[in-house]
Image (cartoon, grey):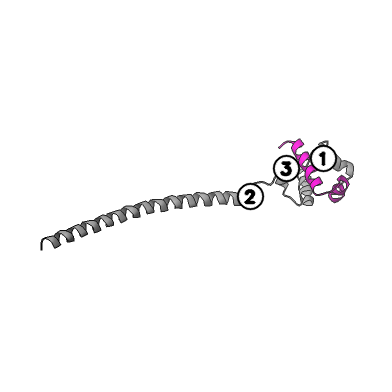
Amino acid sequence: MDNDSVKYNIRNFRKSHRLTQSEMAERLGISRTAYRNIETGETKLINDTVGKIAGILEIDTAELVLGYPPQKTAGRNQEKEIERMSLEIARLENEIANLRKHLETQEELIRTKDEIIGMLKKHR
């Protein structure tokens, strides 16, 4: 992630929280000029500062750096669950196909039995 994106994200999140540069500087314990230099890119960001800014804005540091919320672990867990369920669906579809074949076999046996009974009744 480049410095321009980070400073753009910081400014946008600050504005969306309706905070001024002076308010952010005060909460960070730095001068307004020092904070302005962060947003303009004149000051290189140190991880502690990014973390403090994210804390003030009540967002994850990753979200501040990326500009959007990162994919949560739950998303990966959901993908695994979808894969597991897809395998279960395939297994159940196979079982249904096998049961249909078994049912067809049973129906054929019943038809054969009925034919045999019919023939036996005629030969009495």
Q: Name the residue under label 3.
A: 65
Crowd rating for badge 2 (residues with CA inside 10 Å; few <14, some 14–19, many 20+) = few
Numbered disc 3: secondary structure: helix
Q: Mark 1 points at which residue?
A: 39
**Marks 3 and 1, how far apart at CA:** 13 Å
- Where residue 62 sits, quadrant-wise, is top right
Asked if marks 3 and 2 touch (Cβ < 8 Å), the reply is no
Q: What residue type is labelled 3?
A: Val
Q: Earlier in the sequence, mark 3 or mark 1?
A: 1
Question: What stretch of residues is rendered in magenta?
Answer: 1-29
Residue with the most extreme left position: 124
**Marks 3 and 2, how far apart at CA:** 15 Å
Q: What residue type is labelled 1?
A: Glu
Query: Which residue is nearer to you in this view: 109 or 18?
Result: 109
Q: Residue 37, image x and y in percent?
A: 85, 39
Q: Residue 60, image x and y in percent?
A: 72, 49
Q: Name the residue under label 2.
A: 72
In the displayed structure, 19 sits above or below 111; it is above
